[in-house]
Amino acid sequence: MSPTMIPILRALIYIASFVTVVSAQESSTGTASNLTTAAVRSASSSACVAIGRALGSLIVESSGSEYTATAQGPWSLFNSLDQPTCIVYPRTASHVQVAMKSIFHFGSHYAVQAGAHSAVVGGQQWRLISFAHMNSVSYSPVTGTVTVLPGVHWGDAMAAIEPYASDIGMGLLLGGGISFISPLDGFVLVTGELVTATATNTYSDLFRALKGGANRFGIVTRYELYPAHTGTKDEKSWFGGIVVYPGLSSVAVSNASARYIREVTDPKAGLIVILNTINLTAVDANTVYLFYNGAELPQSIFGDFLSIPSTSQSLSPLSYFDITNLISGNDRGNGKQFGAASWVGDENTFLSGYNHLINFTRTFEAELLASYMIISPVPRSQWTAAPRTRGGNSIGDPGVSYAAINFDLIYPAGVTTVPKDANTGFELLLSQTPPSPGVPLYINECHGSQNVYKTYPAFAALEKTYAKYDPSRFNIEHTAGPIGL
Ligand SMILES: *[C@@H]1O[C@H](CO)[C@@H](O)[C@H](O)[C@H]1NC(C)=O
Ligand SMILES: *[C@@H]1O[C@H](CO)[C@@H](O)[C@H](O)[C@H]1NC(C)=O
Ligand SMILES: *[C@@H]1O[C@H](CO)[C@@H](O)[C@H](O)[C@H]1NC(C)=O
Ligand SMILES: *[C@@H]1O[C@H](CO)[C@@H](O)[C@H](O)[C@H]1NC(C)=O
């Protein structure tokens, strides 16, 4: 069988048999949150000197073209202007270990960059471990697994087998891997030394925590994935594409989305809805991606969307590769800001959130380039499809189908920090649009002020696991990331 790898296809990819991780075991000399700026700078300088001595100037850089390219490379402009004290380019897991030990010893702040696709603001400062050189992908026909190093972008991983392009990095796995027709997969970890975590070994609690735990538990240096076999790029086993709707159809599209979330259980169906909330009269305001793993779009599933007056439709037989190419996101040069919501399918909840976003957008229109409400279904089957033997995740089963909502802001080129007033307004918006009771937020799309972990049905277990693997709370104190652990 040809190993066409589609790591983000709903319910088809299951996590790894294991992941390899690094973290620091020595005791910390202080907690950065209580240190002065000067002390933080001094800690990161000391760590950089020590790592440079151990690994050499090829691996540890504080200037030069590669350093500059990495520092300026992130997808969100808001993360591309910091000047890390140094950047470490590990080639092996043991390099990561050396770096992490010094970071821990000196109590330095740090950040890890895999695909540089985060919209979480901050965290590139002081120092940064870049996985730019740990980017290989290999497939083993013997185990049927794909081994992926953390610097690989999804697109490159697939290109290892099929020509293709996309721009989502491996770090996304740590958020649980929910994406368009995607599911729940993910992994990774932390703790003093290099460990291998599997679904069944002594680190199974860590293995579970990594899936949904984001960067709090350590640094993953290798992923081993069970690939989904989805056919070659020429096998057009899907049907669908893009329908564009005018602003006049926005409420109808929002209603159709709520109903889809509530009623559709067929795992072969895929949907992404993008509602433009900055130009409500645009003829091309709203974009909907509709897919079905079959010869046509069934009326019973997509009938509402197909009957709403549209501006244009581009629907045809597609391979999975065609689909992933339709949905790639490689735009750079602008600051981005995300906020998350999670709603069960209810028309009024959707409309209320949409109207709150319009109010926010209107208020801060002069400061924004674009503003969207993006709706992605997370059907219940994504939580129940993975066999128990694959180790589970740290999020927990919410017991319902729901929509992951991304409030997605784009700032004009040249705006290099989030305007304070807009940020305050955005936080108000998020408080006005809370998750439905018992439904988890998607960590990869959250705002820094959102306590995502607390929305996990399995939060109590995650908290315990964090206390076990990072008892001094080093990662909470020294690296930017989700609050709440
Ligand atoms: C930082 O300082 C505050 C207030 O002095 C204290 O409550 C907190 O425990 C300190 N944090 C750490 C991690 O030491
Ligand atoms: C959308 O749903 C709301 C709430 O059920 C309803 O009042 C409204 O008429 C619907 N509008 C459209 C255009 O479907
Ligand atoms: C909004 O959309 C309309 C219709 O597509 C277009 O004519 C207008 O220029 C747009 N306005 C802005 C501010 O982009
Ligand atoms: C609209 O947004 C502004 C700015 O954040 C806020 O002050 C106001 O309360 C909002 N109005 C409503 C009805 O939410």
Image (tube, helix red, strand yellow):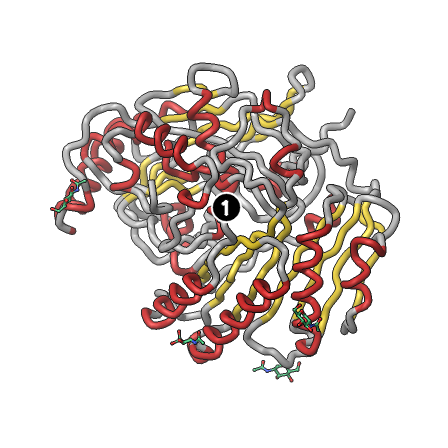
Mark 1 is surrounded, within 10 Å at the Cα level, by few (under 14), some (14 to 19) or many (20 or more) other residues, namely some
The type of residue carrying mark 1 is Gly
Name the spot of residue 106 as percent of width and height, x first.
18, 34
Front in this rendered view, residue 168 or 391: 391
Tell me if residue 303 can be seen: yes
For this orientation, the residue located farthest to the right is: 295
Residue 434, compared with residue 165, is above or below; it is below
Ligand 2 is within 8 Å of the C-beta of the residue at disc 1: no
Front in this rendered view, residue 238 or 247: 247
Q: Identify which residue is drawn at 73% across, 41% down.
A: 267
Q: Identify which residue is drawn at 36% across, 55% down.
A: 449
Q: Identify which residue is drawn at 45% across, 69% down.
A: 411
Name the spot of residue 158 as percent of width and height, x first.
65, 38
Return the residue at label 1: 438
Q: Give the image quadrant in which the ligand numbered 3 is located.
A: bottom right
Front in this rendered view, residue 457 or 383: 457
> Secondary structure beneath disc 1?
loop
Q: What quarter of the picture does the N terminus occupy?
A: top right
Front in this rendered view, residue 437 or 231: 437
